[in-house]
Amino acid sequence: MRKFVWEGEWPSLEDNPDQTFDELGYDSLALLETHSRIRRDYGVQFSDEDLTELTTPQELVDFVNSQIKAA
């Protein structure tokens, strides 16, 4: 799952995955693309509203992992 958040020309998140997406320069399009890839590749269904409540990469990873475990 982390590969979606860490891929591309984005700042490295491995040092501080608790920085907010805003602080890291992620825009809404980048988050929607990440959301789409997670849904497609992992079958994890969650709403855009859920995504807006997840403010850091670590929160997103934890949320997706919890959804996978619950399935």
Image (cartoon, rainbow, N blue to C red):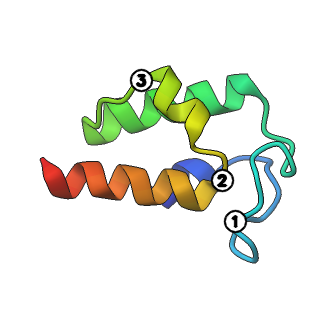
Q: Which residue is mark 3?
A: 47
Q: Position of residue 12 (x, y in %)?
A: 77, 65
Q: Mark 2 or mark 3: which comes first in sequence? A: 3
Q: Is residue 34 left or right of residue 70?
A: right
Q: Position of residue 39 (x, y in %)?
A: 35, 31
Q: Residue at x 45, y 33 (%)?
A: 37
Q: Mark 3 or mark 1: which comes first in sequence? A: 1
* Secondary element type, mark 1: loop
In which quarter of the view is residue 57 placed?
Answer: bottom right
**Amino acid type of the residue tagged 3 in the rendering:** Ser
Outermost residue toward the front in this view: 53
Q: Is residue 60 left or right of residue 21?
A: left
Q: Mark 1 or mark 2: which comes first in sequence? A: 1
In which quarter of the view is residue 1 placed?
Answer: bottom left
* Secondary element type, mark 3: loop
**Amino acid type of the residue tagged 1 in the rendering:** Asp
From the viewer's side, name the closer residue of 64 and 55: 55
Outermost residue toward the left in this view: 71
Any mark on residue 9, and which? none
Q: Position of residue 54 (x, y in %)?
A: 57, 44
Spatial CA span between label 2 and label 3: 16 Å
Q: Which residue is mark 2?
A: 56
Q: How many marks?
A: 3
The crowding category of the residue bearing disc 2, from other C-alpha atoms within 10 Å (few below 14, some 14 to 19, many at least 20), is many
Q: Residue at x 66, y 53 (%)?
A: 56
